[in-house]
Amino acid sequence: MITERLFFSKLRDMKYISHLDLYRCFQRAIVRSGLDVWYTEGFNSHLYLSFPLALSLGFESSCEVADIRLLSPEEDIPSRLNSCLPQDIRVTDAAEAVMDPGEIAGAEDRPEFDDLELSRQALEEALCGSLSGESIIVQKKTKKGALKEVDIKKDILSFELLQDSQLLTADAVLSAGIQNNLNPKVILDRLSERLGREPDHWLVRRTRLITKYGRDFR
Amino acid sequence: MADYIREKMLRAVQKPGRYIGGEPDIIKKDLSKVKLRFAFCFPDTYEIGMSHLGIKILYHTMNSIPEVWCERCFAPWFDMKQQLELYSRRLTTLESGDPLCKFDLVGFTLQYELSYTNILYMLDIGGIPVLSAERGEGDPIVVAGGPCACNPEPLADFIDLFILGDGEEVNNELCRYMISAKEKGLSREETLRGAASIPGIYLPSLYNVEYNPDGTIKRLQPADGAPMPVKKRNVSSLDEAPFPESFVVPLIEVVHDRATVEVLRGCIRGCRFCQAGFIYRPFRARKASTVNRIASDLCANGGFSEISLTSLSTSDHPELGEMLDDLLTWTADRKVNLSLPSLRIDNFSQELIDKTTRVKKSGLTFAPEAGTQRLRDVINKNITEEEIISGCRTAFSSGYTAVKLYFMMGLPTERDEDIVGIAELAQKIVDLYYSLPEKPKGKSVSVNISVACFIPKPFTPFQFVAQDTEEEFRRKQKLLISSVRSRKISVSYHSSDTSYIEAVLARGDRRLGRAILSAYRDGAVFDSWDEGFSYERWLKAFEAAGIDPAFYACREREETEINPWDHLDYGIDKRFLAAEYGRAKAALTTEPCNKKCSGCGIAAYIGRPCFDN
C-alpha cells in the first residue's frame, strides 16, 4: 500500500467549500477517477482520505495537501482527478508521501487588502501599526469557552509587505500544524480593530507549507 | 477588480456554498450560440432543490438542445435575503450568475403548496414583476409545472403559462417554440397565445371564471380557440424517456445525496387520499436492464455511494427481483448501498431485506396510514393488520430494532376508535418484538409513529371532502397521545396550522392570488419552514383579500359543483372519483389496476388498456 500525497489548489469560489464538504468532494472524485484506493475495514467502510492541515472557510490556497492510500501504483493521478473535480480545485501534483503530517510547522500566507475609502498608504500604516509592538495580545476562546489572553507575536514567524503587488499584500509566515497554529484571520482582525470595521476587501491565499527547518512539506 | 460586494455577501451568510455553483458537471454554454435561456427555479433552498429528481431530468433534457441553456436557481435563505436587500442585488442563477430578469423563460417547479410565496419572492428579487399582468415585452415569460400544477388556479395571477403533466417532452417543445417565436419577432401576447396551442400548456389568462353568489364557481369561459379541457402531457414510455447519465453533484451536503433512478411512474394501488397515485397515471415501468444501466452510469459518473430506486411504490415493479439481482452483481464491489424508499409492507420479504442491506443497513419505514382495518378500507390502502405484523416480524428477525410508521388523521369517516387504533397497532408491534425469541439481544425496540393531518387534494376521490377543523385535529392529537402507554412508542405529528393553509391553497381558486400576494407583501417566505411560517400572517392575508379560508378547506363539495381545476384534463374522470368516494364511505375497497381496471378514465385518455390482462 502506498500513501500518495495529493497537492492541490483551492481558489476563487471554492474557498467557500468547507472542510467537510471538501472531504466529500474528494471522495467523489476519487471514486469517479477509478483510482485503485484502499477502503477502511471498519463497520462503516469508507475510502481512506486524510487532510494533514485544514484550511479555514473563506481562504484560498495553492498548496493544499490530501493523503490517500493506493493499492497499486497509478499513472496520471492529477489529470484523472482533475476531470472529476470542480474547476477551481486543481490537483497540481501527486507523489508518495515523504514526510509525516506532524512535520508541518508553518504556512506562508498572502493576505491582501483593499479599501474604497482609504488610500493604500493609510491602509498600509494601519496594517503595520496593528502588528507592531513587542507583543501582540489577542483574546482567544479556550475549549471551555472562557476567554484567554494570548501573545501571538511568537507565531508570526515573519511578516513583510510585497512591494510590487497591485493591492496591499503581505507575505506572512505563521505557525501552522499540530504544535502551534495561528489562523491568518488574526491579521485581518487586528487590522479591522484598528480601522473600526473590516476593510472593503480582504483575501488570504496560502502559498506554502513548511517544516520547522524551513523546507517544503512533501 | 473582484466583486467586493459579492465577497462580502458570501462571507456574511452561514452557508456560502449554496450560492456559488461551480459543481463538476455544471453545464455552461457559449452565450453567443445560445438562442434561448431558461432559468429553472426551485422555490426552496439549494439543499432541498438539489435533492429533487425532476430538476435533474429536465436540466438534462433541456440542455440536450444545443441552442437552449437551462440554468438552476434556488431560493436564498433569510441570511442571503438580507444581504441581497442590503446591497440591492438581484437573484441570479448558479451557472452564469445572471439575474432572473435576463432570461427568456423562468420556470418554477410546484412541489408543495407552501412554496408558493417563495415563487413571488424569487421573481421579486430576480427583478421580474410579480404579477403576470404587470410584465411587459422585455420581461421573461414565467412558467410552472409539477404536481401542484394540477390545480394551478391560486397562482394564475403570477404565472404566465402552466405545464401540465410529464415535463420531459413538452418542456423541450416549449423551448423550441420560444426560439421560433423570438426569431419571428412575436409580441409577448402573441407568443403566449401561440404557446397555448402546444398540448399540455395552459394559459390561465385565456379563461374567464364567473362565480355564484355563494362563492362557488358558476362557469369557466374559454376565450375563442382556447383548448377546453386542457389536457396534461404524458410520456408514453418511461423506458424510452430521457434520463441523465450524470447528475450535477453538489459540493455541499444536500438532503438526498445519492444516485436516484425513477423505476416506475404512476401507481396501481389507487389509495384514495393520494394525489400522486392519480395524476401520474398510467402506470409505467422502466425495464430492469435500463434501470441497471442508468444506476451504473450514475454511480460511475457521480461517485455516489448510494442508489435510491424511487417511485410511488417500488415493490410493485414487475421485474423487481431481476432488477435487484442485476444491481447486486456490482453494487457491493463498488461499495454502493441500495435503498428502496417506497416499499409496501405487504410485499416486504426477507429476500428483499437481504438484497437491500447487503452493504449497509438503513432504517425501515412503513405507511399503514390508518389505525383500523375499516379506515384502511375507506382509504383503499389495501393492507391488513396481519401483513403489517408480519412485515415487522421479518424486519425484527433480521436485526432491525426501529420501525417508523406513517399515519394520517382527519381521514373521511374517521372515528375516535380509529385514532386509538393507531396507538393499539403500535403497541401490538412493541409486543410482537418482545415475543420474538430471535429479537436482537439486549436491545430495546423503538416504534416511531408519525401522524400527518389529512389534506384533501384535487384529482383524488377525496377532493370532495371537508378537512377536519383545527379543533378536531388538536382533539385527536391529544386523544392519540393519551392512548399511547408504552415508552417504546414515540409520536410526532404535523402542525394543523400548516396543514390548513396547505388545504386552502390545494383546492383554491384564482381569488386566492390576492391572499398569496398579500401574505408575501407582509413578509411570507419559506412557509414550509418553521423559520418562515406564520399562521397569523396567513389569516391576516385571507382577511385582507376578503377570503374565508374555511370555504376552501372545510366544506364538503357536491359532485355537481364546478371545481377550480375541472377544466384541466388529467385523464381521470370526475364521475369515477365521485364513485370511488361513494365506495369509500361504504368502506368498500377497489382492486389494484393490474388486477382489475377500475375505469378511472386514463385508459381512454391514452387510447389503450394500461395492462394487457
Image (cartoon, rainbow, N blue to C red):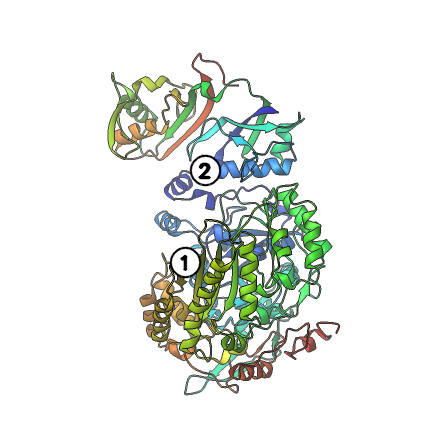
Give the alpha-carbon distance from disc 2 to disc 1, as whole Å: 38 Å
Along the viewing direction, whichever of B57 and B314 lies nearer the viewer: B314
Q: Is residue A80 positioned above or below B59 on the image?
A: above
Q: Identify which residue, B551 or B432, lies in the foreground.
A: B432
Instruction: Indicate the quadrant where residue A165 lies.
Output: top left
| Residue B201 against residue B586 in the figure, above or below | above
**The disc label shown at residue B488, or none:** 1
Subunit under mark 2: A
Give, as a three-letter code, the residue at label 2: Ser
Instruction: Work out which quarter of the rendered image holds the N terminus of chain B and state it.
Output: top left
Q: Nearer the viewer, residue B56 or B28?
A: B56
Quadrant in the picture for residue A69: top right
Q: Is residue B160 visible from the viewing direction of this image?
A: no
Report the residue that reaches farthest toward the right. B612
Give the secondary structure at mark 1.
Answer: loop
Residue found at the far top of this picture: A213
* Residue identifier under label 2: A18
Left or right for B349, reference B462? right
Q: In the picture shown, does residue B53 fall above or below B275?
A: above
Report the disc number at residue B468. none
* Badge 1 amino acid: Lys
Look at the image and tell me whether residue B149 can be seen: yes
Q: Which structural element holds mark 2?
A: loop
The residue sitting at 52% across, 42% down in the picture is B251
The spot of residue B406 in percent (x, y) is: 48, 64
Q: Nearer the viewer, residue A125 or B74?
A: B74
Badge 2 crowding class, 10 Å Cα cut-off, few under 14, some 14 to 19, many 20 or more, is many
Q: Taking B182 as reference, is B556 above or below it?
A: below
